Image: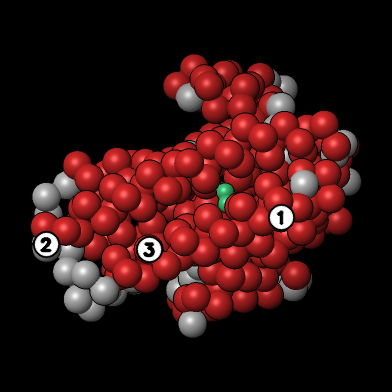
Amino acid sequence: MVVTLDDTKRSAIAMKLADMKAIQELIIQNEEQILNEITDSEIRDRIRKMIEDDRKNKGVLETVNVQYGIQAEPEKTVTEMVNKVRQLMQGSELSLYEKVFQHELLKHQQVMSGLTIHKAAQKVGADVMMAIGPLNTINFENRAHQEQLKGILEILGVRELTGQDADQGIWGRVQDAMAALSGVVGSAVTQGSDKKDMNVQDVIRLDHNKVNTLFTELLASNDPQKIQEYFGQIYKDLSAHAEAEEEVVYPRVRSFYGTSDTQELYDEQADMKRRLEEIKAIDPSASQFKDKIRQLMDVVGDHIRQEESTMFAAIRNNMTSDESEQLATQFKAAKQKIQEKAAK
Ligand SMILES: [Fe+2]
Ligand SMILES: [Fe+2]
């Protein structure tokens, strides 16, 4: 069979995620620009806090991108829009009010992209829902930022028109609007307020859970096209995960996890890769396809159990949490490079 590893719906979502990342970078630049131009201390504090949230959310978006498993470039129209807005924000044609207004529009766009991806993911599969889960936090924070930007606009607008300060009470209303939002998206708030960096075990476990979900989805489906789509994603995810482990994780743990145990992990992954290639050549509607998938699932299951029990324990006992967080960053970066190479 011809395995088209690029399912169109999945690629379209990858592109939307790339759009979000490009816009997120612009959002941070805009806020730095606005901070330069504002003297009001209350507004400055709020913008500073926003920049902090947005930098963290850029990191979350990068994690989601890698977790999603398909790297894409942003749409051409989005890149053009980003360049245009950047010019406007850095130039002197727009008043401060107009700049904040532009920025609020951008936040709105970001919220809508995030919500759209969330809804689209529900249509494509449980594995996609899982990968993009952290977007909820970003969506919530962007909604909360929108409320604050509206408050800032009122203050700046009244000042530009009358030279006087608006009535008090604007921040009170902003606070109420944000509280109403957090009622709707309660859990996202607690997630957002205490984001801790993931260690390498967390990041590896996310991948393992995702591939297990994909196996379950595939085996439950009788639609050859869906089966091919799920297999395409399993192929991509397992290949990138295994290659990144071999590049950064296994060499790092070998000294304390032991040469023979580490070698076993390499051998199991070689077996896994051989099976992936074998399945890739089989028609998904052939009866042996699912049998081969079940066998692969068993091999992967044993391998995952070994990593999550003994290898994770060895990491916990021999690496500090800082070291494990650094390894997580290296692992994600390696995976991203591999995914980018595969996309070409
Ligand atoms: Fe693994
Ligand atoms: Fe592995």
> Is tag 2's residue or tag 1's residue first in the polypeptide sequence?
1
Element under disc 1: helix
Dot 3 surroundings within 10 Å: few (below 14), some, or many (20 or more)?
some
Residue 151 picture location, percent across and down = 64, 35
Element under disc 3: helix
Q: Is mark 1 within 8 Å of ligand 2?
A: yes
> Is tag 1's residue or tag 3's residue first in the polypeptide sequence?
1
Residue 190 picture location, percent across and down = 62, 22
Given the image, on which type of amino acid does mark 1 rest? Tyr
Q: Report whether residue 160 is seen.
A: no
Element under disc 2: loop
Above or below, 172 against 66 in this view is above
Q: Is mark 3 within 8 Å of ligand 2?
A: no
- Gap between marks 2 and 1 measured at Cα: 37 Å
> Residue sitting at 61 percent across and 52 percent down?
264
Residue 91 picture location, percent across and down = 74, 73
Given the image, on which type of amino acid does mark 3 rest? Arg
Q: Quadrant of residue 37?
A: bottom right
Given the image, on which type of amino acid does mark 2 rest? Ser
Q: Report whether residue 288 is seen.
A: yes
Q: Which residue is mark 2?
A: 285
Above or below, 266 against 339 in this view is above
Q: Which residue is mark 3?
A: 275
**309 vs 114, nearest the viewer:** 309
> Residue sitting at 84 percent across and 50 percent down?
255
Disc number placed over residue 250 in the picture, else none: 1
Q: Quadrant of residue 127?
A: top left
- Gap between marks 1 and 3 measured at Cα: 21 Å
